[in-house]
Each structure stands twice: as structure tokens, then as C-alpha cells.
Image: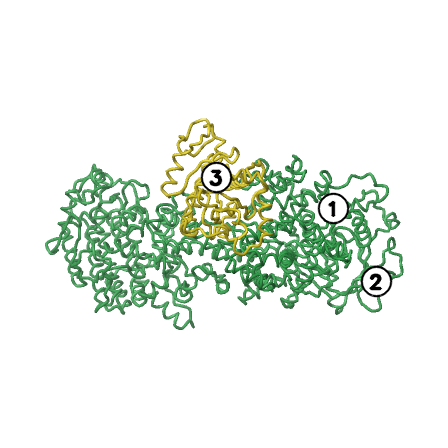
Amino acid sequence: MSDSANAPKPSSSVKLVLLGEAAVGKSSLVLRFVNNDFQENKEPTIGAAFLTQKCNLPSRTIKFEIWDTAGQERFASLAPMYYRNAQAALVVYDLTKPTSLVKAKHWVAELQRQASPGIVIALVGNKLDLTTEAPTADVDGTDGDDSGDARKISTEEAKTYAEEESLLFFETSAKTGHNVTEVFTAIANAIPETSLKTTRGTGGANATSRAGDEQRVNLGGNRDAGAKDSCAC
Amino acid sequence: MFSNLTSFVQKAQQFIDPTQGLNLSNSDRNPSKATLFQGQFRLPISQHPVYEINAELTIPPSNITHGDRDHERGWHYAGKLHLSEAYMCFSTTPSSFSQSASTSTSQAFTGQTHGGGPSGNGFTFPLCAIRRVERLNSQNFQFALAFTTWNGLLFDEPKDKDGKKDKKDGREQRIIIHLAGTRQACERFCDGLKRGLKAGVGSVGKLRGIVAENYSEYLLRTDEKKNATAPDAGLGMIFRYPGDAKKLRDRSKMRLWAEYLRDNGRNVTLIRQPTFHKLIRVGLPNRLRGEIWELTSGSIFLRLENPAQYKQTLDKFEGQESLAIDEIEKDLNRSLPEYPGYQSDEGIGRLRRVLTAYSWTNAEVGYCQAMNIVVAALLIYMSEAQAFYLLSTLCERLVPGYYSTTMYGTLLDQKVFESLVEKTMPILWEHLVKSDVQLSVVSLPWFLSLYINSMPLVFAFRVLDVFFVEGPKVLFQVGLAILRINGEELLDATDDGTFISVLKLYFSRLDESAHPKSENPKLRAVTRFQELMVVAFKEFSGITHSSITELRLKNKDTVLSNIENFAKRTAIRNLGPDSKLLAADELASLYDRFYNVLYDRQQRDMIIQEERKRRAKLIRSRASDLFPNASTENEVEKGRVALGPSTSLMDYDAFREFLASLAKWAISDSPGQSRFDSSFDSDRTPRYQSARRAADAFSPWGTGPEPAEHDFLRRMFKNWDVDGNGALTLQNVVTGLAKIKGKRDIMGTINYFFELYDDDDDGRVDREGILRISESLLFLSRRGLEGSLSPGASNLNLSGESTTARESGGSLPPGALTNERFLGSVSAFIRRCFEYADPDRPGHEETEKTPSTEQQEGGSGEAFAIGDDDEDEEDLLGPDSPTASPSKAKLPSSLSPGDDQVADRNASHRRASKSEAANAALDPAHPLHITLPTFRMVVLADELLEQFFESSFPSSFHVIEGIQAASASASSSGLTTFQSLGFGARAPAPIQPGPPEAGRGLRGMLDGIVTDGMRVATEVRRRMEEAQKELEKNALPGQRPDEEEDDDEDIGVVVGVRGNAAGNSADVDRRSVKSSDRDLLSGADAEAGSYKESGQSLIDVDSKPLPARPMEMNERGVVEFEG
């Protein structure tokens, strides 16, 4: 009710879950997206962290409810708790670490079988800043595997896999912010209209708690600014 | 020693009573008295309740701080005095741990919520902390003992130890205990105490070292030692303790504690009185916090038990790497990063060392995220070593399973928490369900990190203060209180996000007034945190250790099977491409069977180990103060997937057991196999029924049938073990089985079989191999053939429809004849193999045989492309055979039982022309081999064998339904065939036809029949050997029978014999083979019921029973096993 009062566009919330091996930068991606910030030493996520961020599309506003899960292997059995009902998933790997792609593939398989049908999955290779190639705007066009950098997984390899499984695919750097918002925007666009429900909050949540939530998660104008230039719309 | 004897007797009783014995496999459902005792007094698992007696504790008034009248007569507590191997404990809680005590009285400690703490008022003294015991004269009690402890004396320099000075300082701690019991009981207790004290003397030095690290010793130090350096009380001493010391009133708390410790003893000699618990409730002072945590949790006793463990572990593994260490490194900079100590190398270093050391001592847990946060918190208040032992206590006793690789403890407690919320706050619970908010999404981190990263640190530490003294229930109480206090707002929240933010906001305002608008200034002064504590421990005082335990038990199975399903799903999904050859339900079932076997075996191992330990202990009496392996703590169930990575490797014995669960032929023929009929399988699959299992736990194979031992099994194991590490992974098993079951094509199976026997991978199987193959064929068929067998008169095209043509049963006794026939087929197989075998020395080839080299070249590809083979086959088929289709070699295809005889008879007649070669082939001095094409041809030359490879062998693995169902479907025929054919599986002792034990009734009878069947089979085998021996004897008189693969010195002669179609040996052999055929035929004619007769006839006809033979055969069997 009150939420959408000043926003003319329809607003929907989308539950998004981040999965991937430990220390591939899941939390950092979220932090970059939500607060446009980067921390070298983030506390490891225990269970999962919850954050929200809006993304403005031309036709609508998507409010991401982001579940950022713990990456350590043994937390895997908790994951179903978090990807339950998720409409979107970000499966993250570290493109300097081959095992992380293997793990990512496992997650993709898991999601495809266990998560809600029609879930939009994006495969994200993070830590692009550790490769020597200059990150350009057009990532999909850059060729992989220049020797001499820390990259271990070629763009081609991951992209081929992503295509096979019909996943969205990006290479990002949470550190530089490269391509981060693009991932979320692409997901927002890929969510089928039909699966969008109007913001759950408008129905019953009272304004107080909602305000507290936003205060907590994405403070002040920085966020709005970030959101605005981030979501290409 | 008496105590050990009693515990042994107790154990023995448990063995007799299966429901009691359960505590081994399911410790928490029925925990042992020792576990409860250790739990109540927070003692290491080396301690057991040895004696207990009612007693009254008198603490005399202290002469220093309390001279006032109230305390003149001191304090009295009635309670129970317990004695373990190295501890004496007194508790006002009326609990009992004697054998006669009921479980509820042993669990009594779990009831207390406020004030008492789990072990009530009293003390837990290490016996080595007791300096002197005197017996007093008392009118009321026969036994009044005065105990003087080492309180306050241990930290002093040795020169101070003159006693007089101590008195002056008034630090001597003296308590009086009146024993209330029969004279006998008192004396027994005193005797035990005396022994314990004597044994404890040696540990005084150790104790001295321990207490020296405790801050209380420094706090209460004597005047002349004011300059002593303070022991390490955590990073807080360097980097300041969190929170405002003034606001926390740290100084006055410290004063109160100093007073309490002075009066009631410090560290190990501390006596718990009501004030103790009150002081804990208001929050511990910074510098004593670590020490009190260590004391209340009992980790100080671990440290006392093995003070050097921390350092030794670090030294031992220095420089080594592990997965856990990698994970730890990733998180070091991310553990309480706001605390200044963890922005320094000092703090990071301590954190690294403690986490690393623990990951080495408990490799099963290793490292789990959240441990870094917990340890980082501990290290602010305690030394590295203290934190190390406290971490052990946490992981193994306080929050077991929280940090395990499957985190089952965490998940379980979430379930418990949810059901508590449902019970105590039904409206909120309903709301959560309605709004589809998952509670554990918020509460899981609370429990996992013990509120440390949920609340501001100062408050989290207050929770920990109570947690360490009262146990895990505190986590639940606090969690419930949080929800209760925020109930209204939570009822307004309709999604996870709002839910989380309400609580986040609450946590951030814990220091604010709970009633900011109240008129009453006192009420206004109450902070939200104080309110939380009150709600938690007053309103939720009903949440007790036992209610938690109960709920844990109730939910455990669900949680574990959830985890297992998840693990299973994941594991199956991650199996390699081979797994695609098997159906999904086959994989699922394989997975279950694989882990079931491992689980069962581990359970059994544990029980055996327990027993062994107990015996060992009995022998070496009580010198046992070794630090027990962390993993044995809690006697936790092993091998369940959900409980962590116990093992995922299957050794050979486990493999046998595994096979016995899905293939009839893998079950041993020894008399123990009765279980196979009764209690197998049906409820075995994913649910773990330990109840029934306990009863059977002492059979070496548990509840399952005894697996057979056979050369074939060994070969299969070796074949599946592609990595050659003597153990199979699930992947190996799946791949291995996929090779047999997956393709369902006869060539594949034939090739596979050949591969199994081609030891050196050179594409040849030698004579020994051929014999072994035929043995294994008999072995595999001895319980009947399965799958689709054509009933006999086969005008059907076998390669095609035969799969669906199930044995019709019809007029024929279904199994029996088939199996008689199979025996015939096998003997024909041997014959043909030798007939068509290639000599190892092609140079000496005189016959029409294709030189082996050539055959090999052509071999692998097209099986019957070689002209010679075709010729042979034609020959073999002879004129009688109507359909000789050489290319596919659908050989004597008209094989109705009658025809079968004819064919066989024909074959034996026909053999006249060829027999010389065959006989020569049997000559041990003449090495020969068959190649894969030959093998294929020989197999395909026999309808039954073909069917065996086509369908019966692959379908003998009942992956999904297990053998229970299988044997049910074919039970009648299965049984008869087994009896008629039961080829001794060469299991250690099955064949000896000794009379079954008397008085076994039906079973005995059954065994008798079985034994008869075996005798028949034995006979067949014997005759095979005999024939060979005969041959050896005649042809090469000088040679010893067992030297089969002997040198070739007589090769020329042999070749000559072979070519000449003459010689005694050949004759003997031919006759023997023939007669065997005749026997077989008569056997086949015989009614299915008359195995005995057929067995007899075999023996009779042979008419040359050499008594020595059976023995010889056994010998050979043994040799083969080892080879």
C-alpha cells in the first residue's frame, strides 16, 4: 500500500538465493550490489544472511530478497531451507579456482531438480579482477585463458556449460564492481512475468518493520544512487 | 578391581538383555549411567560412578571474611557423595548412578533451572586436590570425615610449603562429610576413597601446573607475592575486554567473587553454594570469566587429565596441511573482526593455533564455520590451552553434532526449537506457518554461534556464562524468550525479511530500557537484556535438559533421514557417467545397501571394541588415565551418513556382506544361514532399526546372512577396485555393477567374466583359470539359476525374446532340472574348454588347432571369424544337431531335458574323435589356455550357459528388492535346487557333513538335507579332481598332484600322447568324463526330491572313492583363498 504509493510502476519481490563454494565471493557480490561497497574481510556467513535491494526495470520495480548462504561444504545440507521458493539463484564460482566450478555445477544440478520449477539461474564467475585481461563492458565477448593471469577457468568453458544448461552467465568482480549490477538486472529481466507476485510486504507488513529493514540493509541515498545507475533502465 | 568387575557384570547383563545393550548403538535413547554421571559432574569420559553414598556436607564458617554469627555453625547440605576413579563429587541434587538406580533418578540433574545449576550445590574435587582425610569421632554418624584440600597451596612456591604459614593465612579449606549408610557401605566407600587418594598422589604435580594458569590463584595471592605475573586471562588483558567495565560494574563483581572464592575454595577446590549461581547470573567479571567457564563446563578436568595435549598436538602436526587448515585460514581474518585483538597478529595467531589443534584432535569435525567465531569469543577471556579444551567440551558434550560435517546437531536442535515454539507460543507458530516463514532461517545462527554474532558481544557473553553452567537448554530458553518478547511485532511480519529485521533491531537495542516510559525508576532501569534473562529463566523454566533430550530423541530420526536423503540425492547425482547405465531406483537402492553394510559393520566393530576395551581395562586395572580419543565420546552412533563422514570405503568383508544382501549365491552355505530366511531385508533398507540389530550384534555378520567366501568374490572385488586400494567407494560399486547389469548384453557379460579370470591381462585364461571359471559357475548356480531360462525345448531365438520367457514351471519341476542340466552344462564347458584350448607353446602344435597367436589376433574382435573354430564347432555339433548356426553359435539348441540327454550322450560319443586332444589338455604338464573367442564359443555352444550369461547372472543381483523377495519368488525351486546342487561354496567349513546338532528340530532336519546336497556337489568336485589325479598318476607317475602348473620337461611326450589318441591316461579320463555324464543324466532323470539318491549314485558309480580326496580338496581350497 504505502510502499508502492510513490512508485508508479508495479513492484514485485523476488526471492534470490546465492550458492557456491566457500570464499568465492558470494557475500561480496551482494554487498556490492546492495551497498556498493567492498570489504576484504567479511565475516563468514553463518547459515545465511538476508538482504534486500531494489532494481528498477522500465516496466516494473523488482525488490530482491537476497539469501546469501554459507559456502562451506557442510552447510550444503542447510541450503534447501534457503532456496525453498526461490525464484532466482546466483550460482557463483571463483574463476581462479577450478574446483569451485565443479561445485557450482553440483549446485546447478541440485537447483534444477529440487528448487521451484522455473527458477532463473545465473552462473557467475567472480574475481575477474584477478585476471590480467582488462575487464571490458562486454564480458561475453572477451576471450578466455590468456596465460599469465590467475584465471583457471576460461570464459569459453563456463559459457558453454551455461548454454547447455540454459543459465544466464556472467563474469564479475565484486571488488571493482564490474558486471555486478548487470547480473541482477539480467535476472530481474529473466523472471517470467507470471511468476511475479506483487510485493508481499504491501499486503500485511506494517510500515515500521519495513522501514527498519531498509534502514538496516541499505542505508540512505547511496543505495538509491547505486541502484539507479546499476540497474540499466 | 571390584568396580571393574561390577561394570563388567553390568555389561554382561546388557549383552543378555538386548534392550539394555542398546545404549551402545543408541546412546542417547538409553544413555549409560556413566554418561549421565559424567554429564552431571562434567567429568571426562574416563570417569565412572564407582561408589555413592548419602552424606551430609558441612562447610565450617570461614575464619576470615565471615566471622559473624550467622555463619558460626557453617553450612549444611544433605546430598549424595559420589566417587569415581579420580574424582569425588558431592551434589544436593538427589541423583543416583548406581546400577540399581532407575534412569530417571540418574537424570534428575536435568530438572534444575534456576539457581541450582545442573549439578546443584556441592563440589567436584579431583582426588589429587585432597590433601588429607581424617576420621572424626561423631555421635550421630559412624563415619565423619574431615577433608583438607590443597586449596590455595598449589600455586605457591615449594618453599612455602611448610604448612604453618598456610594456617596463618587461613586459606586451609576443611570440610566435613558425614556418611549416612550402613557400616558396610561406609567402609566400602572409604576403602574406595583410600585407593583413589593413593592413586591421586601422583597427579598433584600436574594439578599444580593446571591451577597456576588460573586467574583465581593470582587474584587471591598472598601479600608477599604481589609482584607475581598474572596468568593469561585472554586477549582482553592486552586488547581490553569488550564493553564498558564501569558500566558492567566489573570491579564490584570481582570483589564479590574474590570473597566467594576465598570462602569456598578456588578453581578445582571450589564448592558450589547458592551464591555461586547467583553470581554467575549477574555476569562474570572479565578476568575470572574464562576460569569459571572452564570450571562450570568441566573443560578444566580435561585439561587436568592431559595438560600437554594442546601443545603436543600443535608440535606433532606442525607444518602439516589439511583441508580444515585451508578453511581455517580463510576465516581467520573474518572472526570478530571488529575486536582489536583480531586485527593483530597476536590474536589471529592464537585463533589459528586453537582451531588448528582442535581440527587435528577431532578430524571428524575438523573445522566448521562458526567455530571461528566461538573460539574468537573464548580467546578474549581465556588462554589458548583453556580455549582448546573448552572447544572440545563444546563440540563433544555441550552442542554435539553442531559442527559435524553434516551439522545434524544443529538441524536437530532447530527442529526441537520449532516444536518448543509450537508448544509454548501456538499463536506465533501458526502465524509463521501461515506466512510461510521458516523459523530456523533466523534461529539457526543463534544456536550455531551461541548468540555470539547475533547479540552485541557483552550480552552474548552473559548468555554464555549461564550456558556453561546450565547446559544447552539455555540456548533454547533464550531463543524462546526472544520470540516471546517480540511476539507482537513478529505477528505483524509476514515474510522472512521483516521477521529478520524485527529481531535484528531488537538485538541492537538490548542495552536500552525495557520499560522506558515507566513511572517507576527501578523498572525504567531494567534493560531489555535483563528482561530477556528473566523471561528466559523464569517464564521458560519448564524447559529443562530432559525435555530437550526428549524432543531431540523424538525428532532425531526425521532429521537424520532428511540429511540422509539429501546426501543420497547429492551423492547419486554426482556419480559418474557409469551410473547412467543403472536405473535411478537401482542407484538409490545400491546407495542404501552400500551404506547399510558400512553402518552395520561399524556398529558391530564398536561393540566388539567396547568389549575388548573393557577386557583390557579389566586387565590393566585402573592405570588408565590416557586421554580418550575424542571420537569415542558419547558413544555416538557410527556410520550413519547423517552423522558425518565415518567411512565411505568398503573393504572386502564388507563387500561380501554387501553382495550377500543382493545375490543369493553370495550367501554362505554354512549352517548359520538360517537368518537368511527369517529376519532379513524387509525393514532393512533406509531405516535403521538398531533395536533388532542389537540382539544380533554379536554374530560376526550381524542380522544378515553369513556371506560366502569364494575365489569368484575376490576376483570381482579386485575387478571393481579400480584404484587398487583394497577398498571400494560407492562409485566403484556402481561402476562395477553397471558393467554387469547395465548393458544387458551377453557379449558384455561373457567378456566381463573372462576379464575376471584373465589375471595378467594377456587375453588368455590358463587351465587353472578354466577350472576356476567352472567352479565359479557352479558356485553362482548352486542356489538355482535366476532370470529367464528357457524350459528346455528351445525353439526360441535366445538372443532375443528369451529375456521375457520366464521359466514356465509347467509340468517340470522348475528349478531342479534346470540345475541338473546346468551341472551338465558346466561339465561340458570344462570339456570343451580343454578341447578347444590352445597350448601355450604353439611351436609344438601338431594338431589342427589354430596357433594361439593367430587366434589372439583375430580374437578380440570377431569371435567366430576363425575358420578352424567353425570347423570344430560343426564337428562338435555332429550330425544330430539340427540347427548349427556357426556365426552365432546357437549350439545344441534342442535341449529339452530329454534331448539334452541325447545331445550329451551324442557329445560323449562324438568325443571319441576329439577326446584325445581334450585329454591331453587335462594334462597338467601341458600348459594351455583359452582366449576370449574360445571362451565365447564354448559358452555360446551351450544353451544353458548362454542363458546364464545373458540373463541369469546379471539378474542374480537383486539390487532393488534384495534377496528376500527374490528367494520368496523362487523359494520352492530355490531350495530344492540348492539342495540338489549346493556346491560347497568352499566356505571354511561348510562341507563337512557332520551330523547337525541334536535337538535342533526342523532346522536340524533342514541342515541335514542341505548337507546331503552339498555332499553331492562335493562329489562332483572330487571327481573332477580325481580324473585329473588319475591322469597325473598315470601319465606322470613322479609328479605330485598339487603341482599342477609344473614344468614342461615332458612336453614332447605329452604332445605325442595327444596326437596319438592313445595312452592310459586318455582312457581313464574319457571313461571318467563319460561316467560323469551318465551320472548326471541319471541325476536329471531322478525326481527332484531324490537328491540323496542321485548323490549316492554318483558315489557308487564312481566306485573308486579314495578317502584321502576330500581332504586334499580342502587343502587346495585353502591355497586358493590365499592366492
Task: Using the image, tell me which numbered label, if any, was put on residue B220.
Answer: none
Both on one chain, marks 2 and 1?
A: yes
Which SS class for mark 3?
loop
Residue shown at 87% from the left, 56% from the top = B66
Note whether residue B511 is visible.
Answer: yes
Where A12 falls versus B55 (above or below)?
Answer: above
Where B366 falls versus B1092 (above or below)?
Answer: above
Q: Residue furthest top?
A: A148
Q: Is disc 1 surrounded by few (<14), some (14 to 19) or many (20+) residues within 10 Å?
A: many
The chain that hosts pointer 2 is: B
The chain that hosts pointer 3 is: A
Across and down, in percent, residue A121 comes to 43, 45
Chain yellow in the figure, letter: A
Report the side of B508 relative to B836 (left or right). Answer: right
Residue denoted by label 2:
B136
Across and down, in percent, residue B734 comes to 37, 50
Report the side of B279 relative to B795 (left or right). Answer: right
Which SS class for mark 1?
helix
Which SS class for mark 2?
strand
Residue denoted by label 3:
A231
| Rendered image quadrant of residue B221 | top right
Across and down, in percent, residue B760 comes to 32, 41
- Choose between B783 and A33: the one closer to the eye: A33
Type of amino acid under label 2: Leu
Q: Residue furthest left?
A: B879
The alpha-carbon separation of the residues under discs 3 and 2 comes to 86 Å
